[in-house]
Image (cartoon, rainbow, N blue to C red):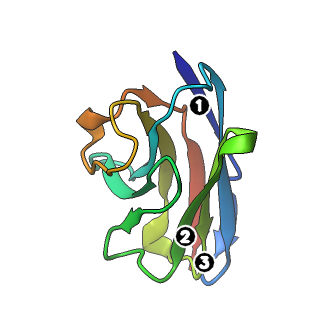
Amino acid sequence: QVQLVESGGGLVQAGDSLRLSCAASGRTSSRYTMGWFCQAPGKEREFVGAINWRGTTTYYVDSVKGRFTISRDNAKNTGYLQMNTLKPEDTAVYYCAADINRINSIGRRASEYDYWGQGTQVTVSS
């Protein structure tokens, strides 16, 4: 079991930045790809991006490329989602997730991820 806890969400204005953290506990010896997803009201959960275990590969959806950066510090069992130049359309609950079946590659579907955090709300006002 891997437990994930997100933090760092909040209410910001358009153009501002936020950094979300995802702290892992439990079987922290497990190696996994970490993904980030978001879910806006009335919408399905959407893939934002992910990073492989070694941090050598990242993937982002087009809507956040150049604005969001995913990183991780395995020594601290923590992953990060740096969100810059935020837009009102980024408003959503953001989730981190762990895919323990992948180390080097990245999955983009929520069904591929085994463990999830509780989510943190990000609200961007115009």
Q: Amino acid at mark 3?
A: Asn
Residue 84 numbered mark, or none? 3
- The reply, left or right, for residue 39 in relation to residue 80 is left
Instruction: State if disc 3 and disc 2 touch (CB < 8 Å).
Output: yes
Residue drawn where x is 55% and y is 70% of the image: 69
Please tell me which residue is depicted at 56% across the width and 76% down the height of the picture: 86
For this view, does 24 lie left or right of residue 42?
right
Label drawn at residue 4: 1
Vertical position of residue 7 compared to residue 1: above or below: below
Q: Which residue is depicted at the point 66% across and 44% down? A: 74
**Which residue position is annotated with label 2?**
69
Ranked by sequence position, the earlier of labels 3 and 1 is 1
Which structural element holds mark 2? strand
Q: Upstream in the sequence, badge 1 or badge 2?
A: 1
- What amino acid is found at the position of numbered circle 2 in the picture? Thr
**Quarter of the figure with the C terminus:** bottom right
